[in-house]
Amino acid sequence: MTKFTGPKEELIVLIYRFSYFFRKIKPLAVLISYINSIIFSIDISPFAIIGKNFRINHGLGTVIGPCVIGDNVNIKQGVTIGNKKNGIQKFPRIGNNVNIYANAMILGDIKIGNNVIIGAMCFIDKDIPNNSVVYNKRDLVIRKIK
């Protein structure tokens, strides 16, 4: 069962699940995803694989390309998840129990571990180990959680 913060977020994820169901009929899946993008300003690829208890809070401007997202992931406003280079399919893989805060970017063929917190405005293009907190000071800081 998926938990939501409101009826809008519930509808967004429901439309994504509907487009994912039709992913083998690519034009239909892309059309459903496009309608979701126009109505809610949140773009979720029908080719993204998203686990249970996925939450988008205040998701305006969020873009989720083809990727793998685990269970209990919480995403805030303006997050971008997807490919780093055009033409070569490189998918981010996000673990379970991950919180991604506003305007973070996760790009490329990388793995985000389990129990990770990614702070606002972080640009992630390398692997993040399990049980970490990532935030920006001047440079990207990765700190293990004890």
Image (cartoon, helix red, strand yellow):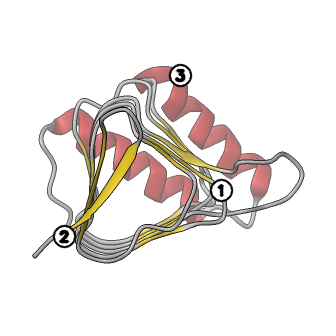
Q: Amino acid at mark 3?
A: Ile
Q: Nearer the viewer, residue 138 or 64?
A: 138
Mark linked to residue 59:
none
At x 56%, y 30%, the residue is 35
Residue at the right extreme, as displayed? 87
Q: Amino acid at mark 2?
A: Met
Q: Secondary structure at mark 1?
A: loop
At x 29%, y 73%, the residue is 71
At x 30%, y 35%, the residue is 137
Q: Is residue 65 left or right of residue 137?
A: right
Q: Is residue 118 left or right of residue 34?
A: left
Q: Is residue 4 left or right of residue 91?
A: left
Q: Amino acid at mark 1?
A: Gly
Mark linked to residue 38:
3
What distance separates the C-alpha of mark 3 from that of mark 1?
A: 25 Å
What distance separates the C-alpha of mark 2 from that of mark 1?
A: 29 Å
Instruction: Say if 66 sits above or below 75 in the image.
Output: below
Instruction: Say if 121 sits above or below 127 in the image.
Output: above
Answer few, some or many: residues within 10 Å of disc 3's Cα (few below 14, many 20 plus, some between 14 and 19). Answer: few
Image quarter where the C terminus lies is bottom left
Q: Secondary structure at mark 2?
A: loop
Query: Residue 108, position in %: x, y?
Result: 65, 56
Q: Secondary structure at mark 3?
A: helix
Which one is earlier in the sequence, the residue at label 2 or at label 3? Answer: 2
The residue pinned by badge 2 equals: 1
